[in-house]
């Protein structure tokens, strides 16, 4: 399983008009049906887990390419479309309250797909861990508010979730795919695309491996002894002159006061469970972003374990347009996706006017960026 990409989008409010949403459902059903027939279930999941292809799909369905609503509305349309088919693919969860129903819906889908209870529990674990990694291990100031779990009858799955940065009013989209399983906590992504933040704690980075190991040791050795770091408001900058190994960005403003009594209490509960590794530690209920951050900072500050402060996003998201942002995408692969979507539109059940409208939206994605 791996995270396959991240895309940042400006936050837009409002809902898609009913007439537009119904057309999106109709067209998405045709596209998925054709994809399932031509490339199988795995091919569909592979494409939907690609942030570039997903944005192209959303644009074709009729949503603004640069809007955060593209994610939530496109997934809503796909969920309804797949519920009306017998393709062996379903979408669980969604935006806001709907995301809280993911585990319940996975139980129902397990019965529909005749999965064992053990398989269902594993899927529920994956859903929880994917959300926890992007909320707590990659601390990029985005809080998840959308979580869609796309499950195929053969047990393969993809996850598309989105977080909100309340300060910048940007949304960041995360894509995950199950077919290349490695680990939840050690660089689970192959491509990350987004608006880079100045300061992030990335505990999934290879560079953070020692901090992950040290965090487990701190918990297994009884976190009660961490109380001595509760004294006052100790800025990390106070340590820079005393420890040559500590290299912090100027924007670093985290405090050891993050290690409060509630964090100590939750860490003591984890101590009683004696986690074997970092993934097991992260999976414990009550071990959230604050506990993860406190352990990471103590590991870094006090014990010298290296920690990554770099945003894992490598590229800015763009398909072209008046902003003139460069293309950070494999054009050959992207052009192939465009041609496929063109064929899907022409073979769909839409009337001629709707087909022409969809093709026009698709053609805009192929326009080169303006120099103005």
Image: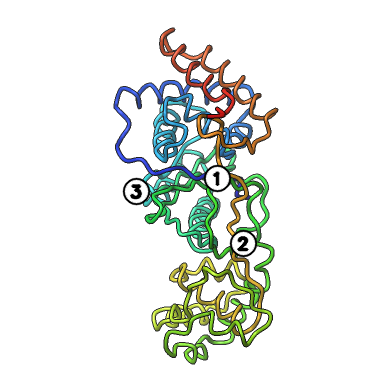
Q: What whole-number distance in Å separates the C-alpha atoms at marks 2 and 3? A: 26 Å
In this image, 181 relative to 366: left or right?
Answer: right
Q: In the displayed structure, does residue 304 sit left or right of residue 176?
A: right
- Left or right: residue 216 versus residue 86 is right
- Residue identified by numbered label 3: 96
Q: Are marks 3 and 1 in contact (CB under 8 Å)?
A: no
**Which residue is located at x 64 percent, y 46 percent?**
191
SS for callout 1: strand
> Can you identify the residue that label 2 sits on?
204
Q: Find the residue positioned furthest to the front.
A: 372
Give the labeled residue for mark 1. Answer: 175
Mark earlier in primary sequence (3, 1): 3
User: Residue at point 56% right, 39% down?
Assistant: 51
> Where on the picture, by quarter, is residue 257?
bottom left
Real-space CA distance between mark 3 and mark 1, rounded to the nearest whole angstrom? 18 Å
2 or 3: mark nearer the eye: 2
Q: Residues within 10 Å of mark 3 (few under 14, many from 20)?
A: few
Mark 1 surroundings within 10 Å by alpha-carbon count, few (fewer than 14), some (14 through 19), many (20 or more) = many
């Amino acid at each position: 399983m791996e995270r396959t990409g991240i895309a940042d989008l400006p936050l837009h409010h409002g809902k898609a008009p009913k007439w537009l949403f119904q057309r999106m459902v109709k067209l998405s059903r045709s596209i998925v049906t054709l994809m399932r027939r031509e490339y199988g279930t795995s091919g569909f999941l592979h494409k939907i887990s690609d942030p570039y292809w997903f944005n192209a799909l959303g644009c074709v369905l009729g949503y603004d390419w640069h809007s955060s609503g593209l994610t939530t509305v496109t997934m809503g349309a796909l969920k309804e479309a797949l519920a009306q088919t017998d393709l062996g693919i379903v979408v669980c969860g969604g935006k806001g309250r709907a995301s809280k129903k993911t585990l319940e819906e996975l139980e129902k889908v397990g019965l529909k797909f005749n999965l064992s209870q053990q398989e269902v529990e594993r899927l529920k674990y994956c859903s929880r861990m994917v959300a926890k990694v992007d909320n707590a291990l990659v601390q990029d100031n985005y809080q998840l508010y959308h979580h869609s779990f796309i499950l195929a009858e053969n047990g393969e799955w993809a996850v598309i979730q989105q977080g909100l940065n309340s300060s910048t009013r940007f949304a960041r989209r995360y894509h995950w795919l199950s077919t290349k399983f490695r680990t939840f906590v050690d660089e689970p992504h192959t491509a990350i695309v987004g608006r880079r933040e100045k300061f992030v704690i990335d505990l999934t980075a290879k560079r953070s491996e020692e901090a992950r190991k040290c965090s487990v040791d701190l918990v297994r050795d009884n976190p009660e002894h961490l109380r001595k770091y509760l004294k006052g408001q100790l800025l990390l900058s106070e340590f820079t002159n005393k420890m040559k190994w500590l290299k912090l960005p100027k924007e670093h403003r985290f405090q050891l006061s993050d290690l409060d009594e509630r964090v100590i209490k939750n860490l003591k509960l984890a101590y009683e469970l004696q986690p074997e590794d970092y993934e097991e530690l992260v999976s414990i209920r009550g071990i959230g972003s604050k506990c993860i951050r406190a352990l990471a900072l103590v590991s870094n500050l006090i014990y010298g374990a290296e920690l990554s402060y770099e945003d894992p996003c490598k590229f800015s998201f763009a398909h072209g347009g008046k902003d003139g942002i460069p293309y950070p995408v494999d054009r050959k692969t992207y052009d192939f996706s465009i041609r496929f979507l063109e064929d899907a539109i022409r073979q769909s059940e839409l009337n001629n006017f709707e087909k022409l409208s969809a093709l026009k939206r698709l053609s805009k994605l192929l326009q080169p960026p303006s120099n103005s």
